[in-house]
Image (cartoon, rainbow, N blue to C red):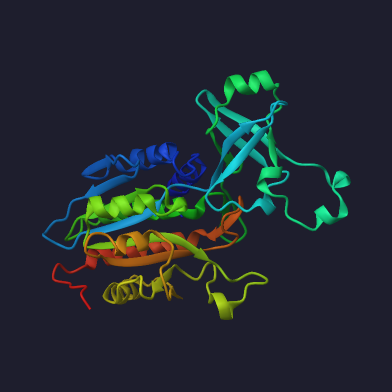
Amino acid sequence: MQKKDLEFLSELVEAPSPSGFEQPAAKVFRDRLTPVADEVETNVMGSVHALLKGKKNGVSVMLAGHIDEIGMMVNYITPEGFIAFAAIGGVDAAILPGMRVRLHTSDGTLLGVMGRKPIHLIEDDERKNVTKIEKLFIDLGLSCDEVKKRVRIGDPITFDVGLETFGDDMAVSRAFDDKMGAWIAARVLEEVKKAGGAPGDLIAAATVQEEIGMRGGVTSAYGVNPVVGIAVEVGHATDYPDIDKRKHGEADCGKGPIIGRGPNCNTALFDLLVKAADKAKVAYQIGAEPRGTGTDANAIQLSRGGKAAGLISIPLRYMHTPTEVLSLKDLDAAVKMLTQFVLDLDPSTGFTP
């Protein structure tokens, strides 16, 4: 991955953007694509749509990656000045004790420490159980008066970690789910522009509020109204200990993006994505999706009278933790595959079974 593209990925994942508070990540996405796209608009939900107009009356394609991340929200300030909080999205309470977090206020950010009783003061029976979120608190190191001056109920909170590379072309960060999907959508638009454009319109969409019910995907699919919509997401890697491959399938980091196959994925579109991967000489994996996928592909498929929906996933280890891990090679491979698909999409292609 080129340095400038890695810097874009880092800026995007490190922009604080829990569901409902995506504006910083949306700005990064807009700033990157405004010089490239023909039009960039932000809808009332906060999703960003960058349009590259087609050269002919071809098939319109929307690539959607959601820019919201899991996080927390200030729920209560105790008389001592500690922060009680509620989860935004699927936060695992087991990983929280001892973490550093950032509380985002209207005047800037505050460093906080996730606190609970130390192990010495926890009864033996309690040690066997995960501490519930309502029993945790955030210590801002400030007096109660100062906390109440600077913090409001509803202020968002994120994990205080960023992107680092390690090992063999691997990267670790919070919020790869799913800002790396928006990164891929943006990079495909850039590559298609370099190639002279596609037959049909291409829309790179950075959608919002996926973690709390695919809300941005619903409104973007309806508003953009593409013929084809592909959600670019993360998928569960199964290449580390204690994952049952008979139950969850095989998906390895570094062996290419996963092309979803199942009722949520249009069969003709699946075949074209496989063909594009082969032509681009990109390694890929196939993921069995026997029901709704729980991604923006759900929202896209069911929009209006139905859409040709697809799902491309990047194998991800340790999803919904501050240490999500993926292979940068898989991201570049997904860009190549989807660029090939968009450029080769024949205007006469039909997606009706």
Q: Can residue 140 be seen in this view?
A: yes
Residue 75: x percent and y percent?
58, 36
Residue 55: x percent and y percent?
13, 56
Residue 321: x percent and y percent?
60, 53
Task: Name the residue nearer the viewer: 321 or 240.
Answer: 321
Q: Residue at x 32, y 57 (%)?
A: 63
Q: Which residue is drawn at 38% across and 58% down?
A: 296
The quarter holding residue 104 reads: top right
Q: Is residue 102 above or below residue 233?
A: above
Total numbered labels placed on residues in the image: 0
Question: Residue pushed farthest bottom?
Answer: 246
* Quarter of the rendering occupied by the C terminus: bottom left
Q: In this view, does 95 lie to the left or right of 105?
A: right
Q: Residue at x 73, y 54 (%)?
A: 130
Q: Is residue 22 above or below residue 110?
A: below
Q: Residue at x 24, y 65 (%)?
A: 306
Task: Name the residue nearer the viewer: 129 or 329.
Answer: 129
